[in-house]
Every structure is written in structure tokens, then in C-alpha cells.
Image (tube, rainbow, N blue to C red):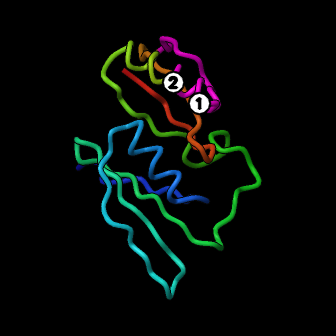
Amino acid sequence: MKLEHIGIWTKDLEVMKVFYMTHFNMDCNEKYVNVKKGFSSYFLSFESGTRIELMHREDINDPAFKKGQTIGMAHMAISLGSKSAVLKLTNKFREMGLKIIGEPRTTGDGYFESVIEDPEGNWIELTT
């Protein structure tokens, strides 16, 4: 078994597509649109084959709670391969004005990571 993909509802499908493609070197399929359902999506792929499905529908709204701190999906982790890559990308996101939830550190279970928010507030662990 393997994790095939994670689906993320988005407010701005195009902004999120550019963010993930630019900063995580992901490939993207052509936009899927279902006019009858008012649904559109992209599948973005990592080199490993794991994918993220970015989805949009006008009737899907922001939750009343803070993402990452409620029951359900808390975050996704993306392995960057090295401590220096984690530091570099964390600093790049800081310079872009994205929120840094957790500063780079070695956790109690031995991971070197930071935690950032993507442009729509989803939490991403950047790990080695």
C-alpha cells in the first residue's frame, strides 16, 4: 500500500497550484472542470508519485476553527532531504510573509523540521 493523494479544498485554485509547483517542484495535470457540479481541480505530483489534489467549489467555505488545531487532518509533511533545505525554504517562506507555525528544530522524536502555513492556512511540516 501507499498514500496515493491528499485532497485540499481551496479558495483560490490557481494561487495554490502555483505555490505548490514553485516551492515543491511538483508537476501538474490539466485542470479538470465539472460545470454541472461547479467543481474544478488539479492533481499535483511529486517525483515519488504521491499527489496532492487541489479542489475548488464555490459552496465550500472556510471552517470556523483554526486549521491544524482541531480533530481531523492536522498537517502534511514534505521531506526536503536535508537540514539545510529545511532552513533555506523556511527562511524563503518567512521572507514571503507566510506564517511560520514552528521554527526549525530537532523534535523529541528526532526529526529536524519546521512548520509553515501555505497561502490558505494549511499546515505543512518541512522535514529532512
How far apart marks 1 and 2 lie (CA) works out to: 6 Å
Direction from residue 65 to residue 127 in the image, left or right? left
Give the x, y percent position of residue 116.
56, 31
Q: Residue at x 50, y 13 (%)?
A: 108
Which one is in front, 90 or 107? 90
Above or below residue 27? Residue 94 is: above
Q: Which residue is mark 2?
A: 92
Direction from residue 48 to residue 89 in the image, left or right? right
Count of numbered marks? 2
Residue 80 figure quarter: top left
Q: Which segment did they paint magenta?
A: 90-108
Q: Residue furthest bottom?
A: 36
Q: Residue at x 52, y 15 (%)?
A: 104
For mark 2, give the secondary structure: helix
Q: Residue at x 54, y 28 (%)?
A: 93
Above or below residue 27? Residue 30 is: below
Check residue 15 for magenta coloring: no
Q: Looking at the figure, which quarter contains the C terminus?
A: top left
For mark 1, give the secondary structure: helix
Count neighbours of disc 2 (C-alpha within 10 A) and say few if under 14, some if 14 to 19, many if 20 or more.
few
Check residue 104 for magenta coloring: yes
Which one is in front, 118 or 70? 118
Label 2 is placed on what type of residue? Lys
Q: Residue furthest right?
A: 64
Q: Which residue is mark 1?
A: 96
Residue 77 figure quarter: top left
Q: Answer whether labels 1 and 2 touch (C-beta < 8 Å).
A: yes
Label 1 is placed on what type of residue? Met
